[in-house]
Image (cartoon, rainbow, N blue to C red):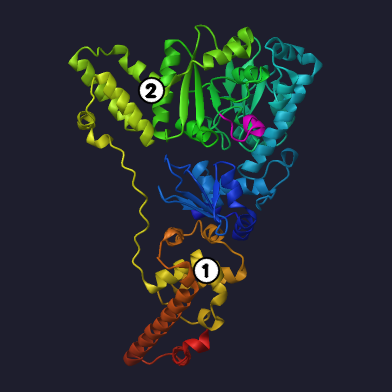
């Protein structure tokens, strides 16, 4: 949980407003394939690997829950969990979607983009957008014909230059810092965005100089970073923005936004390594392509891709380094291989990359090699068998010891069984029981459903859970009960707080209620009650709630009266306490019919 101090600058009323205007189905549906069943939506959980849909989203409650791994929450919780955002960052992300400004003290700054203190995400997004436009304009300047000539020489057509918003960072050390930083806060924003660097003397210089610039966008089309290719000789040939509050290289894929703008759920996605590979392939009509920013493919990137498509093709050089990179990707994808997912590995001829291959032979030659891509089992066993002699018993034992732990990481039961059968065939084992005996006990994957919170059912706990899960019940509570002086009764203050909020916002949802208390110490209690299965049939929710309310109400009155009587025996009650006792006595004589 985020410490309250980090989010205290954001008014609770604004968070309430934000959640009230947010559609959780839309937020999650933009990242996960949702299927409607009745009133709710279901999907495979984006937080763990599974073959059946146990992740549910309630439009009415604005609340999601996975019955497999137990994750749950509202729109803010979803963004925090999926995008690894802190609470204030998630608030800003939702505000951006709605065109709202997070209310914080601001000062004028970089074209209205910089506030006091640390730059907010909104301000950094605005800054990066301004720089993207600036770099695009620089590419068109007469003095920079060499940059345009380079793109033309590489075969990058004008429509693709515009689609991917390619720009140019002019030569010189301080073009950006001079143009966009007239105040210290503006320098801070440029530094936070990774666009300028401070040297040992305290001066700033531009990170990108004399480079073609490739804006890197998130799934909402916002620029989060840049990749730059040098035009002249020099190192590094390619330079990326550093990690920033907006940019995590391990979670970002170049070209994914542009791809899903063309096709929301493509049949397959080809994964390559560089910007120019993506651009060249798109120029030749091969649109389903993304790049990993020149780094090894990460588990986060794989998970992100599998939320968009069920078929991936990884493209690597055919040399030993390419084979090693493919093996690392295979190890990362095995735990995410649910049934229905297809993964292949494409290896290029020596000395070729996707850009050079498609430029030389056109899309036909490229796709011909793509058709020859290895599937998971081919790569798995061909790699393991490279240094194993299956004609010797120790070789077969070695293959078994190396292959079985990898195979048992596959969650998809059908695929796991097929891989085990292939292993058995290579080991010369036809008896399935013999192969089962080889399985390491700790390697077996046991799919257990997430255990619901084990809560002892007390009247107050049930009352809180029913109200939390069904906020409209607040309208059934008589004012005389909500005003009862029972603050000393365990749970009554929390019940009254929930009740007051529900009366203030009659259309409130479960997701909004949780959002209001998201940074409060009682949030874990509310979260547990939100997903607690109290076993009350929906037809009897209202009746049970009112019966439980009356029981808690009368029990609270009795306990408080007993406390006052006990105190009176020891010493005389104060005038206020005597008045309270008379009030409680009158309330105790009320019948259910008089209250409800």
Count residues near mark 1 (Cα–Cα under 10 Å), then give few for <14, some for 14-19, many for 20+: many
Q: Is residue 362 left or right of residue 449?
A: right
Q: Is residue 293 visible?
A: no
In the rendered image, residue 169, in percent from the top left (x then y), is placed at 69, 21
Count residues near mark 2 (Cα–Cα under 10 Å), then give few for <14, some for 14-19, many for 20+: some
Q: Which residues are magenta?
A: 258-267
Q: Identify the residue position indicated by label 1 in the image.
A: 498
Q: Quadrant of residue 195?
A: top right
Q: Is residue 156 above or below residue 221?
A: above
In the rendered image, residue 543, in percent from the top left (x then y), is placed at 47, 76
Of the numbered discs 2 and 1, the one sitting upstream in the chain is: 2
Q: What residue sits 48% from the left and 31% below the top?
A: 302
Q: Is residue 394 above or below residue 101?
A: above
In the rendered image, residue 351, in percent from the top left (x then y), is placed at 52, 6
Give the structural element (helix, strand or loop) at label 1: helix
Q: What residue sits 45% from the left and 69% below the top?
A: 464
Q: Is residue 123 left or right of residue 382?
A: right
- Contact between labelled residues 1 and 2, with CB atoms less than 8 Å apart: no
In the rendered image, residue 284 lying in the magenta stretch gets the answer no
Q: Is residue 151 visible?
A: yes
What residue occupies the far right of the structure in this picture?
142
Q: Nearer the viewer, residue 309 or 575?
A: 309
Q: Is residue 285 left or right of residue 48?
A: right
Q: Which mark is residue 377?
A: 2
Give the structural element (helix, strand or loop) at label 2: helix
Q: Is residue 100 left or right of residue 7?
A: right
Q: Quadrant of residue 445?
A: top left
Q: Nearer the viewer, residue 525 or 272?
A: 272
Distance in Å between CA atoms under marks 2 and 1: 55 Å
Q: Nearer the viewer, residue 156 or 286?
A: 286
What residue occupies the far left of the structure in this picture?
393
């Amino acid at each position: 949980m985020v410490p309250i101090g980090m989010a205290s600058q954001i008014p609770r009323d604004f968070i309430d407003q934000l959640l009230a205007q947010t559609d959780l189905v839309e937020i999650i549906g933009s990242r996960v394939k949702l299927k409607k069943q009745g009133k709710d939506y279901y999907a495979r959980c984006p937080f763990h690997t599974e073959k059946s849909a146990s992740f549910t989203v309630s439009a009415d409650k604005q609340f999601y829950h996975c019955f497999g791994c137990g994750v749950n929450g509202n729109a803010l919780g979803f963004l925090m969990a999926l995008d690894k955002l802190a609470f204030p960052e998630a608030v800003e992300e939702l505000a951006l979607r709605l065109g709202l400004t997070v209310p914080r003290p601001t000062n004028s700054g970089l074209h209205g983009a910089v506030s006091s203190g640390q730059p907010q995400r909104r301000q950094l997004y605005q800054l990066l957008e301004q720089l993207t436009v600036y770099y695009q304009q620089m590419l068109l300047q007469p003095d920079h014909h060499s940059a345009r000539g380079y793109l033309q020489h590489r075969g990058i057509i004008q429509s693709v230059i515009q689609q991917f918003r390619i720009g140019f960072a002019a030569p010189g050390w301080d073009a950006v810092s001079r143009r966009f930083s007239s105040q210290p806060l503006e320098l801070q924003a440029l530094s936070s965005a990774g666009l300028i660097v401070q040297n040992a003397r305290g001066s700033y210089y531009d990170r990108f100089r004399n480079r073609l610039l490739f804006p890197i966008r998130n799934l909402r089309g916002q620029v989060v970073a840049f990749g730059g290719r040098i035009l002249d000789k020099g190192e590094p040939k390619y330079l990326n923005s550093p990690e920033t509050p907006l940019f995590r290289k391990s979670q970002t894929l170049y070209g994914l936004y542009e791809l899903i703008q063309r096709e929301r759920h493509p049949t397959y996605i080809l994964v390559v390594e560089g910007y120019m590979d993506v651009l060249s392939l798109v120029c030749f009509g091969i649109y389903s392509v993304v790049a990993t920013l020149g780094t090894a493919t990460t588990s986060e990137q794989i998970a992100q891709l599998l939320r968009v498509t069920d078929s991936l093709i990884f493209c690597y050089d055919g040399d030993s380094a390419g084979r090693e990179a493919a093996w690392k990707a295979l190890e990362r994808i095995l735990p995410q291989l649910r049934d229905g997912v297809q993964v292949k590995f494409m290896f290029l001829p020596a000395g070729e990359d996707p850009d050079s291959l498609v430029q030389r032979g056109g899309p036909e030659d490229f796709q011909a090699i793509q058709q020859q891509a290895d599937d998971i089992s081919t790569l798995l066993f061909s790699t393991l068998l490279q240094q194993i002699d299956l004609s010797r018993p120790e070789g077969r034992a070695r293959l078994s010891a190396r292959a079985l732990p990898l195979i048992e990481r596959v969650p998809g039961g059908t695929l796991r069984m097929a891989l085990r059968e292939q292993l058995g065939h290579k080991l010369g084992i036809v008896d399935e029981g013999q192969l089962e005996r080889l399985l390491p006990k700790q390697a077996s994957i046991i799919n257990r459903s997430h255990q619901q919170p084990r809560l002892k059912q007390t009247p107050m706990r049930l009352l809180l859970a029913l109200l939390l899960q069904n906020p409209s019940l607040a309208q059934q509570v008589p004012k005389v009960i909500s005003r009862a002086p029972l603050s000393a009764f365990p749970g009554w203050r929390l019940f009254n707080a929930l009740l007051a909020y529900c009366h203030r916002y009659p259309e409130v949802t479960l997701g909004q209620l949780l959002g209001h208390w998201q940074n409060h110490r009682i949030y874990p209690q509310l979260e547990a009650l939100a997903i607690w299965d109290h076993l009350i049939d929906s037809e009897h929710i209202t009746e049970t709630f009112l019966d439980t309310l009356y029981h808690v109400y009368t029990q609270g009155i009795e306990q408080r009266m007993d406390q006052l009587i006990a105190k009176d025996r020891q010493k005389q009650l104060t005038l206020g306490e005597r008045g309270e006792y008379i009030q409680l006595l009158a309330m105790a004589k009320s019948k259910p019919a008089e209250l409800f």
